[in-house]
C-alpha cells in the first residue's frame, strides 16, 4: 500500500509516490492541467499502477498559518478528489516546499529550463516525505 503526494497548482499538479513500506517519497510526474475532467483522467492513469492507502495534498497556507485563496482551492480539489477516487485525502502544510525544491535544484546546478519542468514534482516529493516522516515517527 502506497501514499500518493500531490502539489496542486493552477497550471500543474506535481505527483509523488511512496515506497510500499511508506518510508520514502519519489517524484513521478507533473500533470499539465487542462480541465478537472482531464486532470482526473490523467491521475486515474497514474493511480491505477499503485495500491493506494491515501492521498496527501499540499496545503499552501499563508506564512502566518492562515488559509488563503490558494489553500481553499487545494482543499476544494482534495474534496472532489476524495469523492471521485474514494481514497482518504490528507492535507499537509506545504509552506516553503517549492522554495526548498528550487534551492535543491540550484545546488545541483540545474538549468532554469530544467528546474521549471521539475519543480512541482520535487515539491510533491517534499510534501509526501514530510507526511511520511511524521507518521513513521509516531509508529
Image (tube, rainbow, N blue to C red):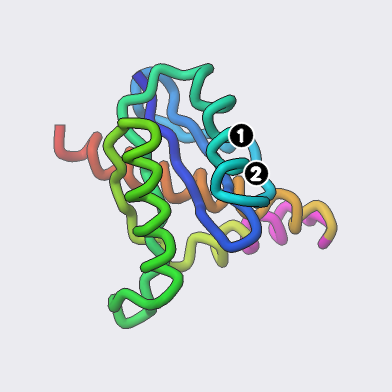
Q: Where is residue 13 drawn, in percent x and y?
A: 58, 49
Residue 71: quarter of image: bottom left
Residue situated in front as seen by the camera: 50 or 111:
50
**Residue 95, picture quadrant:** bottom left
Residue 101 numbered tag: none
Judging depth in this view, the residue of 8 and 24 nearest the camera is 8
Residue 11 in picture, x, y percent from top left = 65, 59
- Disc ID at residue 42: 1
What is the magenta range? Answer: 102-112
Measuring 75% from the left and 51% from the top, which residue is drawn there?
Answer: 117
Q: What residue lies at 43% left-to-right and 31% top-to-bottom?
A: 24
Asked whether, in this view, residue 6 is left or right of residue 117, the answer is: left
Check if residue 61 falls in the magenta segment: no
Between 126 and 17, the one nearer to me in the picture: 17
Q: Which residue position holds label 2? A: 31
The image quarter containing residue 92 is bottom left
Question: Where 40 falls versus 11 (above or below)?
Answer: above
Amino acid at each position: 500500500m502506497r501514499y500518493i503526494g500531490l502539489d496542486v497548482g493552477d497550471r500543474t499538479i506535481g505527483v509523488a509516490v511512496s515506497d510500499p513500506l511508506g518510508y520514502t517519497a519519489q517524484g513521478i510526474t507533473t500533470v499539465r492541467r487542462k480541465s478537472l475532467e482531464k486532470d482526473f483522467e490523467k491521475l486515474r492513469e497514474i493511480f491505477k499502477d499503485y495500491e493506494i492507502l491515501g492521498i496527501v495534498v499540499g496545503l499552501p497556507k499563508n506564512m502566518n498559518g492562515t488559509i488563503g485563496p490558494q489553500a481553499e482551492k487545494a482543499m476544494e480539489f482534495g474534496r472532489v478528489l476524495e469523492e471521485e477516487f474514494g481514497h482518504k485525502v490528507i492535507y499537509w502544510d506545504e509552506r516553503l516546499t517549492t522554495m526548498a525544491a528550487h534551492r535543491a535544484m540550484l545546488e545541483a546546478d540545474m538549468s532554469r529550463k530544467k528546474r521549471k519542468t521539475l519543480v512541482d514534482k520535487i515539491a510533491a516529493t517534499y510534501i509526501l516525505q514530510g507526511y511520511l516522516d511524521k507518521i513513521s515517527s509516531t509508529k
